[in-house]
């Protein structure tokens, strides 16, 4: 790959987004777990639950602040690095980002400060309410971001306006209730819950292995394994739902994940393993499981699944259709809209394929002069890198099932074996703490790399979306962001580890108050 | 959806132009004092305990205040997509500097007290200083450039092009007039931060804040006045060749613009806008005077001053939002760079629903946190920064 402006812009977006998503999943999950723990405290008034809330809250805070910091960049870099994209789809894409600020981020950020500072200033119930506001805010925030992202994967409710040279909103409900966005939202927040669950189980397991803070660690595992078990089932089910949605609007993504070059006749089989070869356009040594793909992709055993080659043929047809729209658009613009009705009709009939014609513009000066070979080459550009998609997806799914298994086991031991966790389980739990983060980053890779060569699927090619900047601009900011983020990440990890090593702090007064109140009946003194 | 026909496109555009101003004012009036406080931190606090007091005056609220910035970005994207696209890509490296500085700020607040080390804490103090002073300065520099016009053009397909070498582009933004407007912005933020500190602290920190605040407030008044004079005599305005269609499609290339005249001509055609600079001067002056008498009202007066200063810029330039010095016709204005009619309407509905809710819970949070921050508070509270 030649590292020009577009590649550097992509690299920068990928780097800043992936750094951002190191912090977000823990915020999503831990905020809910904190609110749950505090609710238990408010209901039972046992000091241990307050201590747990405060301890995990300290770790939450160290993580949260970097999520906020790295999030600032995300809000502005569409305009900085993807200005053509921003102008082209801002009419639709900007709205969910703004609503995210209004409805979600304001709630989350206004209350998070009070949550930390308000322990002494608020009564327990009010403080718990503040915690729930933070959790609801952060989760709603994810909803709106994924509505925006879902629109890039499945652009609904919008039409091209030749006068403004951009996509404009025609149906807001379609954007809101975009099935891809809904499936992605639940999949993503559930992944965040699993991340937080694995984190809490892992850190608590480390305490148990060390024989420290036993009471806190046991209760934390109990909460986290139940929460995590439910969440990991949801991740997998909704991942499957995303797969089903992908068959409707991103068939190419699914075919690439599958390394499925030829159309699979019904019932389609699933490639468990194989070596995808982009040059030869085949997947070698494929081990197939019959029926499974048909079930995931079509929820039936009677529908076929289109392979990459068939989809490319479809793309070629759409490029040719798109050229009709492109030609009409040029006439409309040259005459400032004053054209014969046939031209307008031709444009409207084919405007859905306009983006496909734009695929040619990075190959020829004027798409209308493209040769048949160039059109075929452009159609093949709609295929993302198959091997990276194939492998990343499989690793992600493998991690997902492994975490499900661990959480199920921990849940089982907690509830049916009196919490006698074997050493091996505890060690495994500590060892796999990074796993949910890896799986989440891989998930984003599959979703976004798999969307290539488009920024908005079928509408706007990535190659046209970037700002008119110099490679030097990008070099400075890419280097700057990576250096800054890496420094902050290292500091964050060190502080996190230090806080874990230090462990929870006993709130002497609260414990004393509890003991005084419960002393007569306390067969077992307060924990 | 037919509902959006309830308000016509022209009215929606003017409302969203107003809301753009509200967002910028909201940012400067809330996050503005956080920036001012952070920029003053190394100077008003001499010991670690004093600096912790200073940080904790904004500790619980900066996160919420900063959302004005994020919301501003999102709202410009949603309501003025061409502005979002042209400005942030045009001010590319300047934006990078602002972002880098802003990224340091949350981390500085949160991580500074995590280690009991002098070097560690001093480094974060200067990171916070950068996180406050750099954005406050560069926001003003950006406004200075907007007033002069920015050297961008739009290609036929509306790709924005900002020619030139990347270093020269950055240096071009840092021209004398723009830097001068940067000083207006910086002193305005510093004085507002100082008035917040006078309200929230006591003793030596409060006395120092009052001194810095008085100086910064007076400097803001003087530089604001001088910037007006400079604008009258040294900066050319922009105007439409013929009045554009207020209901037309959002394509800046459809209406012809030329340079000429002065921005201040607006004060002869719309004399009522004089109220904005007057509010700016009166608010800033009242902030300085009340710092000695009634510190709560000094903060309120500072916000009035900020409201006046920022709306002066918007009202002076109306209907221009981002003029182009390279190709004036490409200038972005209220009439040709908004979102579609439907998007503006939907976003307005959202703003009308959520802004009151936001203001309600934000006020509640400030009420809970009301009162002075003392050294005793900071040392006894394990959750303090």
Image (cartoon, grey):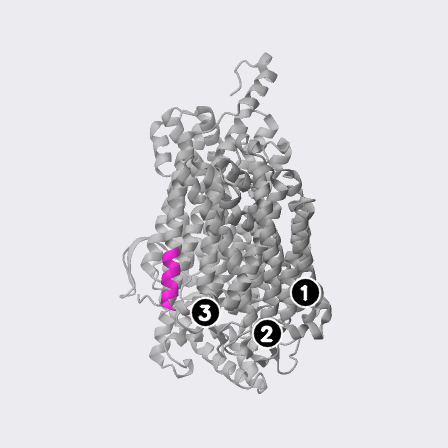
Left or right of residue A357: residue B377: right
Asked whether disc 3 touches disc 2, contact meaning CB atoms under 8 Å apart, the reply is no
Image coords of residue A411 (percent x, y): 45, 32
Q: Which mark is residue B233?
A: 2
Neighbor class of circle 2 (other Cα within 10 Å; few <14, some 14-19, many 20+) is: few
Q: Is residue A248 visible?
A: no
Indicate whether residue A258 is drawn in magenta.
no
Which callout, 1 or 3, points at the residue further toward the start of the chain? Answer: 1
Q: Residue at x 34, y 63 (%)?
A: A261
Q: Which mark is residue A267?
A: none
Q: In the rendered image, which residue does mark 1 sit on? A: B15
In the depicted structure, whether residue A183 falls above or below residue B117: below
* Closest to the observer, A432 or A102: A102
Q: Circle 1 sits in a helix, a strand or a loop, which is it?
A: helix
- Which of discs 2 and 1 lies nearer the camera? The answer is 2
Q: Residue at x 61, y 69 (%)?
A: B229
In the depicted structure, whether residue A317 falls above or below residue A462: below
Asked whether disc 1 touches disc 3, contact meaning CB atoms under 8 Å apart, the reply is no
Image coords of residue A524 (percent x, y): 52, 15
Q: Which residues are magenta?
A: A467-480
């Amino acid at each position: 790959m030649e590292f020009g402006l577009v590649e550097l812009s992509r690299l920068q977006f990928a780097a800043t987004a992936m750094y951002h998503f190191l912090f977000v999943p823990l915020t999503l999950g831990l905020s809910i777990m904190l609110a749950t723990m505090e609710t238990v405290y408010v209901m039972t008034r046992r000091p241990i639950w307050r201590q747990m809330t405060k301890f995990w809250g300290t770790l939450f805070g160290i993580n949260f602040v970097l999520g906020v910091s790295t999030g600032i960049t995300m809000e502005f870099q569409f305009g900085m690095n993807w200005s053509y994209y921003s102008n082209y789809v801002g009419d639709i894409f900007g709205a969910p980002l703004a609503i995210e600020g209004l409805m979600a981020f304001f709630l989350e950020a206004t209350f998070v400060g009070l949550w930390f500072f308000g322990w002494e200033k608020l009564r327990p119930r009010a403080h718990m309410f503040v915690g729930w506001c933070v959790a609801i805010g952060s989760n709603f925030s994810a909803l709106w971001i994924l509505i925006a992202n879902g629109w890039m994967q499945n652009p609904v409710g919008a039409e091209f306006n030749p006068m403004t040279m951009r996509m404009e909103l025609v149906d807001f409900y379609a954007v809101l209730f975009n099935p891809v966005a809904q499936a992605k939202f639940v999949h993503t927040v559930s992944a965040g819950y699993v991340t937080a669950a694995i984190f809490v189980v892992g850190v608590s397991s480390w305490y148990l292995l060390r024989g420290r803070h036993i009471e806190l660690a046991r209760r934390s595992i109990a909460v986290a394994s139940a929460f995590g078990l439910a969440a990991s089932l949801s991740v997998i089910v909704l991942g499957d739902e995303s797969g089903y949605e992908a068959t409707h609007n991103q068939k190419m993504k699914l075919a690439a994940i599958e390394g499925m070059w030829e159309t699979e006749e019904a019932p389609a089989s699933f490639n468990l393993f194989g070596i995808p070869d982009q040059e030869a356009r085949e997947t070698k040594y494929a081990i197939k499981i019959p029926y499974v793909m048909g079930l995931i992709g079509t929820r039936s055993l009677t529908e076929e699944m289109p392979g990459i080659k068939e989809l490319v043929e479809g793309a070629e047809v759409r490029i040719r259709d798109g050229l009709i729209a492109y030609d009409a658009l040029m006439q409309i613009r040259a005459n400032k809209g004053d054209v014969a009705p046939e031209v307008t009709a031709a444009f409207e009939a084919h405007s859905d394929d306009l983006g496909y014609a734009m695929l040619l513009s990075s190959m020829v000066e004027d798409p209308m002069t493209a040769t048949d070979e160039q059109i075929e080459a452009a159609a093949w550009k709609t295929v993302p890198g198959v091997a990276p998609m194939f492998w990343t997806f499989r690793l992600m799914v493998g991690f997902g099932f492994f975490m499900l298994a661990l959480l199920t086991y921990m849940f089982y031991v907690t509830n049916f074996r009196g919490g006698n966790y074997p050493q091996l389980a505890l060690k495994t739990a500590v060892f796999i703490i990074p796993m949910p983060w890896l799986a989440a980053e891989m998930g984003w890779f599959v979703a976004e790399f798999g969307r290539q060569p488009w920024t908005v699927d079928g509408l706007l090619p990535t190659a046209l979306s970037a700002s008119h900047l110099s490679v030097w601009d990008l070099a400075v900011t890419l280097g700057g962001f990576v250096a800054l983020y890496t420094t902050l990440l290292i500091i964050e990890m060190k502080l996190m580890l230090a806080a874990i090593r230090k462990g929870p702090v006993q709130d002497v007064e609260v414990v004393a108050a509890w003991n005084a109140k419960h002393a007569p009946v306390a067969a077992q003194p307060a924990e | 959806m037919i509902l959006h026909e309830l308000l016509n496109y022209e009215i929606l555009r003017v409302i969203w132009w107003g809301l753009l101003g509200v967002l910028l004012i909201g940012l400067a009036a809330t996050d503005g004092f956080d920036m001012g406080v952070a920029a003053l931190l190394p100077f008003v606090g001499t010991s670690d305990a004093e600096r912790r007091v200073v940080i904790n005056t904004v500790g619980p609220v900066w996160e919420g205040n900063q959302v004005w910035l994020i919301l501003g970005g999102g709202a410009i994207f949603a309501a003025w997509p061409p502005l979002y696209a042209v400005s942030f890509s045009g001010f590319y490296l300047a934006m990078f500097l602002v972002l880098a500085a802003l990224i340091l700020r949350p981390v500085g607040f949160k991580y500074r007290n995590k280690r009991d080390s002098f070097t560690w804490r001093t480094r974060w103090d200067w990171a916070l200083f950068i996180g406050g002073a750099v954005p406050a300065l560069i926001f003003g520099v950006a406004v200075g450039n907007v007033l002069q016009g920015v050297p961008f053009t739009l290609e036929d397909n509306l790709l924005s092009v900002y020619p030139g070498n990347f270093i020269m582009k950055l240096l071009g933004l840092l021209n004398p007039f723009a830097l001068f407007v940067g000083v207006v912005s910086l002193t305005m933020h510093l004085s507002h931060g100082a008035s917040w500190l006078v309200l929230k602290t006591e003793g030596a920190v409060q006395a120092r804040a009052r001194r810095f605040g008085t100086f910064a407030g007076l400097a803001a008044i003087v530089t604001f006045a001088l910037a007006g004079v400079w604008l009258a005599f040294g900066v050319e305005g922009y105007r439409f060749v013929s009045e554009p269609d207020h209901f037309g499609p959002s394509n800046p290339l459809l209406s012809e613009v030329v340079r000429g005249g002065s921005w201040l001509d607006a004060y002869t055609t719309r004399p009522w806008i004089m109220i904005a600079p007057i509010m700016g001067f009166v608010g800033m002056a009242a902030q300085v005077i009340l710092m000695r008498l009634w510190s709560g009202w000094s903060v309120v007066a500072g916000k009035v001053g900020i409201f006046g200063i920022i709306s002066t810029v918007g009202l002076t330039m109306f209907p221009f939002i981002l003029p182009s010095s390279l190709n004036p016709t490409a200038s972005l204005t209220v009439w040709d760079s908004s979102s579609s009619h439907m998007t503006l309407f939907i976003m307005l509905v959202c703003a009308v629903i959520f802004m009151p809710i936001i203001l309600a819970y934000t006020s509640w949070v400030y009420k809970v946190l009301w009162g002075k921050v003392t050294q005793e508070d900071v040392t006894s509270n394990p959750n303090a920064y």
